[in-house]
Amino acid sequence: MALDRKTTPNDLNAFWMPFTANRQFKKEPRMFVGAKDMHYTTSDGRQVLDGTAGLWCCNAGHCRPKITEAIARQAAEMDYAPAFQMGHPAAFELANRIIDMAPKGIEHVFYTNSGSESVETALKLAIAYHRARGEGARTRLIGRERGYHGVNFGGISVGGIVNNRKVFGTLLAGVDHLPHTHLPAQNSYSKGQPEHGATLADELERIVALHCAETIAAVIVEPVAGSTGVLLPPKGYLEKLRAITKKHGILLIFDEVITGFGRLGSAFAAQHFDVLPDMMTTAKGLTNGVIPMGAVLTTANIHDCFMQGPENMIELFHGYTYSGNPIASAAGIATLETYREEALFERAADIAPYWEAALHSLKGLPHVIDIRNMGLIGAVELEGIPGAPTKRAFEAFLRAYDKGILIRTTGDIIAMSPPLIISKGEIDTLIGTLADVLKTLP
Ligand SMILES: Cc1ncc(COP(=O)(O)O)c(C=O)c1O
């Protein structure tokens, strides 16, 4: 008997849901059963406007024909090819296309299956790169407070979101953290990059002085911190980080899992800020979120340094069964074509001022204490209920869903990142509905 996926299953117990209040959800399930362009369809037949591009990933909107057709075609033609010691054309073609849109100086692509795996890969590459160059003492990794780099051990070690770290033991040794860049007293209600805080990058000099540059492999930061609640880099901050890392021979990794593929109105944040890192971690928008795939992008310098020793030897003992999976590669190619044909990155840049104005119109509504934005990212920070952190924002999320919009919350911050195809009318609906929610929030 065919499975009818349009109905709500009557036993929700077996599936242990990720990053979810499982008990609350299973009492009052919220099920999506369909998606098209800017909307989800719920199991009770309602349309919900997607204010978050799924999870910051469906940048071209949902069920885009070119992507779904490419997946079906590839699945019928060749479902899987071994990732080790064998190749297939789509993975090479996609890599070339990614490099075509990447900043000049970035020349190689190492495939993973997720943002978390991209981060682990980049951290391992950083350590192995220094070792290959005869600087094997460079093993320390520097992250940042409030950073999010996925959920694997390397990622939570360099990450700085306390709840993601505190119950998982001692994590990686030899990790230190820069301070976060959130300065509400000086920067609240900034539009785009905040004025104050570039000097926070100088903290890297303090960390270098403490540990000695010769022990530090890499610094990893999100150019725009997303999951912690949208923290923008202060003006001049990323440039300073680049200068200090370069001065000390430390690699700089931009975690572009959220900012990659158009979110800021350019292909990557590295181009938006005109700062070239040594590696970039990506995922999400690479396949429009449709099929799991990630990629680490590196300079030639990093790649070439591994290309030594006998030619029949594996140069890097790292990779995944699904690295460059044919169906994911086909989805990636079709996704990048969709972005190009519809000029979606330019579209995001064009509509960003409208988005900014709409978001900042929420200033003055009950409980709102800050609003931040850049490209098609926006955050509205709420004053938490004393003694009940996250409760107010979670209530806003539930009420928003009931009123037909999907938003995301982290702590008491509402974060939004709509598909890049959003229209002005849909921005009005999203922000107008959010305003109604905020006005009635306890
Ligand atoms: C900056 C950043 N890095 C890594 C990740 C982890 O990606 P994934 O959930 O695909 O493992 C995320 C996910 O939101 C992210 O925002």
Image: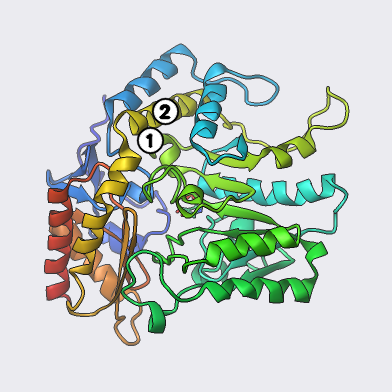
Pick the front one: 234 or 208: 234
Mark 2 CB lies closer than 8 A to ligand 1: no
Q: Which mark is residue 281?
A: none
Amino acid carrying label 2: it is Ala
**Left or right: residue 277 compared with residue 421:** right
Residue 75 seen from this side: yes
The secondary element bearing badge 1 is classed as loop
Alpha carbon distance from label 2 to label 1: 7 Å
| Percent position of residue 174, x then y | 74, 66
Pointer 1: what residue? 290
Pick the front one: 307 or 438: 307
The earlier-in-sequence mark between 2 and 1 is 1
Number of numbered markers? 2
Amino acid carrying label 1: it is Val
The vertical placement of 202 against 12, above or below, is below
The residue at the far bottom in this view is 386
| Percent position of residue 196, x then y | 46, 76
Query: Which quadrant of the rendered structure holds the C terminus?
Result: bottom left
Pointer 2: what residue? 331
Q: Are marks 2 and 1 in contact (CB under 8 Å)?
A: yes
The vertical placement of 238 against 306, above or below, is below
**Residue at image x 45%, y 60%?**
224
**Left or right: residue 428 compared with residue 333:** left
**Residue at image x 61%, y 31%?**
321
